[in-house]
Image (cartoon, grey):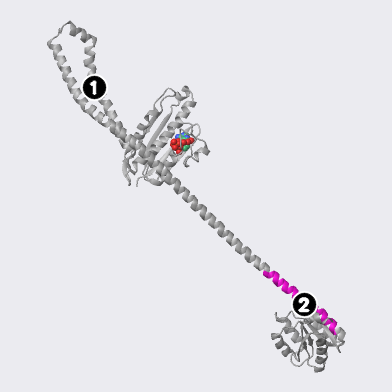
Amino acid sequence: MNNLSFSKNTLLIVDDNPTNLGVIFNVLDEAGLEVLVAQDGESALQKIEYVTPDLILLDIMMPGIDGFETCSRLKSNPSTSGIPIIFMTALGNTDQKVKGLSLGAVDYITKPFQKEEVLARIQVHLELRNLTKDLASKNQLLQEKIEEKTTLEKTLQQLNQELEKRVEDRTSELKQALQTLQQAQLQLIQSEKMSTLGQLVAGVAHEINNPVGFIKGNLTHAETYIQDLLEIVHLYQQQFPSPGAAIATRAEEVDLEYLIQDLPELISSMKVGVERIRQISVSLRTFSRADSTSKVEANLHEGIDSALLILQHRLKANDKRPKIEVVKEYGNLSLVPCYPGQLNQVFINIIANAIDALEDSLLKQNLEEIKVNPRQIMIHTEVDRHRNVAIIHIKDNGLGMPEEVCTKIFDYLFTTKPAEKGTGLGLSISHQIVVEKHDGQLSCFSEQGVGTEFIIEIPLA
Ligand SMILES: Nc1ncnc2c1ncn2[C@@H]1O[C@H](COP(=O)(O)OP(=O)(O)OP(=O)(O)O)[C@@H](O)[C@H]1O
Ligand SMILES: [Mg+2]
């Protein structure tokens, strides 16, 4: 036996017979093994609590608990069940050998001992034992590595999840910031557009107002003066039926009779004209009214009318197309709490879009078709008492729009118009004004070839 290969192995011999013990002890000690001894089962079990031998040589017949019982206890304890046990039996006792093996022993040696045989068997089992231990420790190592890897993987997964979450959070933060920025920009553009237009309109209205005021004032006097003059002419005609050739010729030249009859009508139509200019000026001032910071009760029909007035020049016929009709069906809207200047802007945007759409369709169709189906903007207003909202429908019978356009019209900067004609802001601003500023709704229904309808809903409470 090669001493070195087992020099680290410990063996426990359990035998109550000192002679046997002595013989075996010497054989193994000589072979270089660390040898422990016990003289009965119980002291063997106690020893094993402190030192774990690599192999146990176990006698069967002993005082106290015998070898089989000792073997059973060792095998039923997980911390000792792996220690290989070799029984020492009397020669030819087959029953004992079989029982020992069935209790978990790995082998047996027979008394009287054959030194070579004993050493050979012990060597085999120690080698096996060492290999098993080696394997177990490698297994353990492997298990640890696997556990380490699993833990690492878990940590990695967690880190990954955390990272993904942070990226997600950051992305949504950025999205939010972008949205806020766009909204701020919209508001800026909106107020800029409004104030420029408002200032212009207010300026024009103001400039018109003064001359209209004194034309209107003087017209009243002119009417009285003309009435007086006509009465005097009349008196002259009565007093001097033959005024002389020069007067008679001149009177004939100017068609005095017609002039006398037409002049009052002329004055009253001038009064109607001046009144119309005055109304326009009032309308313009309504439109340009600076918005207060809080809502005010306003007459939306006035707002719609002023928007129509501002767009009047675009509704008229021109050398390329006939006029665009406006059909109004105003319901009983009374006063609506709102920011009137902003709602006017919504009306202007939607009506201007309708005019654009109608112009396109007018340019594409021939006069006959247009005669049959005149181009119109229908404006209908009503109150839904049930939902307590004011509803304004603005509908055109232009070309309508395809589904893919319809889904984008409220998007910031979305336009299908050439750069000089559209910025793509009109409807996104209008949407913001209706939905965010007024808690209302702005919806659009469009059918290609039929037309488009915008519905504005403003809560009354
Ligand atoms: N009544 C309508 N009929 C057909 N298409 C319409 C109508 N109203 C809006 N659109 C479509 O919606 C798009 C967006 O309208 P929006 O008013 O936001 O921008 P725009 O008119 O193109 O430019 P602008 O900023 O000058 O108003 C238009 O380009 C057009 O394609
Ligand atoms: Mg527009």
Mark 1 neighbour density, 10 Å: few (under 14) some (14–19) many (20 or more): some
Q: In the rendered view, would you say 287 is above or below 2?
A: above
Q: Which residues are magenta?
A: 118-144
Q: Is mark 1 within 8 Å of ligand 2?
A: no
**Residue that sits furthest to the top in the current view:** 245
Towards the viewer: 316 or 446:
316
Q: Which residue is label 1 attached to? A: 267
Q: In the rendered view, would you say 295 is above or below 74?
A: above
Q: In the rendered view, would you say 398 is above or below 427?
A: above
Where does the N terminus fall, quadrant-wise? bottom right
Residue at 22% x, 13% y: name it.
257
Towards the viewer: 324 or 178:
178
Q: Position of residue 184 (x, y in %)?
A: 42, 46
Q: Position of residue 382 (x, y in %)?
A: 37, 39
Q: Which residue is label 2 attached to? A: 130
**Residue that sits furthest to the left in the current view:** 239
